[in-house]
């Protein structure tokens, strides 16, 4: 929840100019607030889709008496391609459950949008060695509701809650261990899905740690938070991924 309309438009214009052509090497998307989606989307369209448009959330129903909510159908209608679901801030602050997130995931697949499914543990859960159980339970809620193949064209974002907005980052080794765990778990359902699904890392990613994170075997990219509010920093991360 950052920025004015003018700021979002200027940011999009800067990104499309500085990242021109990067779409040939890496997939880049930005997820502005609902209010700024169409304005940012128009800027991105002028760049020949170098950068894709994403949204930060969605409602589980396609339409109806849900005042203040936005449906997957509405997002698709204005050119959104990616949608974040299950972000830790919504799990913690809004109280979203695994079942509600699974329903949102299902709604996105129905509208042929790409879900970015966030999973992750709190600091107390990590200290109690519950990381694997927590993350896999969050994944299993999706699998039981939508089936394993619904993950084939989705993105999984591992974001340890204790590393979001704190400046703390899971070490490349810690992140890789969880990413490997996720892929191994999915392999038990479908080796094809496990091998093809993109698993990205989110949690205080910046230009200083991106290269080491991206060098890990099972880390396919990043969900950038605070660093995405600074054009130079976000551009640097994208270029590290692209080169």
Image: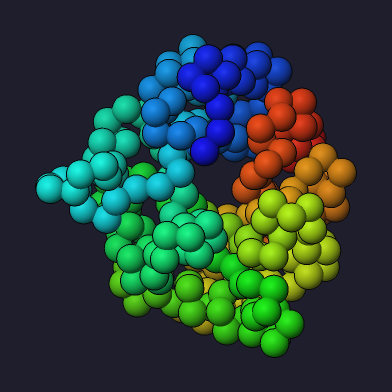
Q: Is residue 232 left or right of residue 8?
A: right
Q: Position of residue 203 (x, y in %)?
A: 69, 55
Quadrant housing residue 241: top right
The quadrant of the rendering that contains the C terminus is top right
Residue at left 50%, top 64%? 92
Q: Position of residue 40 (x, y in %)?
A: 47, 21
Residue at left 27%, top 55%? 60
Q: How many marks?
A: 0
Name the foreground residue: 114 vs 7.
7
Q: Position of residue 84 (x, y in %)?
A: 46, 49
Q: Is residue 22 above or below residue 109?
A: above
Q: Is residue 199 left or right of residue 128?
A: left
Residue at left 34%, top 71%? 99
Name the foreground residue: 214 vs 38.
38
Q: Residue furthest bottom?
A: 128
Q: Residue furthest front?
A: 93
Residue 173 visible in the snapshot: yes
Coloring basis for residues:
rainbow
Residue 187 visible in the snapshot: no
Name the foreground residue: 155 vs 39.
39
Q: Is residue 238 left or right of residue 104?
A: right
Q: Position of residue 235 (x, y in %)?
A: 73, 29
Residue at left 33%, top 57%? 104
């Amino acid at each position: 929840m950052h920025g004015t309309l003018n700021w979002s438009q200027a940011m999009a214009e800067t990104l499309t100019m500085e990242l021109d052509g990067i779409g040939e090497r890496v997939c880049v998307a930005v997820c502005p607030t609902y209010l700024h989606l169409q304005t940012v989307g128009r800027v991105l369209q002028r760049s020949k889709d170098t950068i894709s448009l994403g949204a930060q959330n969605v409602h589980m129903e396609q339409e109806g008496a849900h005042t203040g909510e936005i449906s997957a159908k509405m997002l698709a209608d204005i050119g959104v391609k990616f949608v974040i679901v299950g972000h830790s801030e919504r799990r913690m602050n809004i109280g979203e459950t695994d079942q509600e997130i699974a329903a949102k995931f299902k709604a996105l697949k129905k509208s042929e949008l790409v879900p970015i499914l966030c999973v992750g543990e709190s600091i107390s859960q990590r200290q109690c060695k519950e990381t694997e159980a927590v993350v896999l339970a969050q994944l299993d809620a999706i699998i039981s509701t939508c089936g394993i193949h619904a993950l084939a064209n989705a993105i999984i974002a591992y974001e340890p809650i204790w590393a979001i907005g704190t400046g703390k980052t899971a070490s490349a080794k810690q992140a890789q261990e969880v990413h490997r765990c996720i892929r191994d778990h999915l392999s038990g359902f479908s080796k094809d899905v496990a091998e093809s699904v993109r698993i990205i890392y989110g949690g205080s990613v910046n230009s200083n740690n991106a290269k080491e994170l991206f060098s890990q075997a099972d880390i396919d990219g990043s969900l950038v938070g605070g660093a995405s509010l600074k054009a130079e920093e976000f551009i640097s991360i994208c270029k590290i991924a692209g080169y």
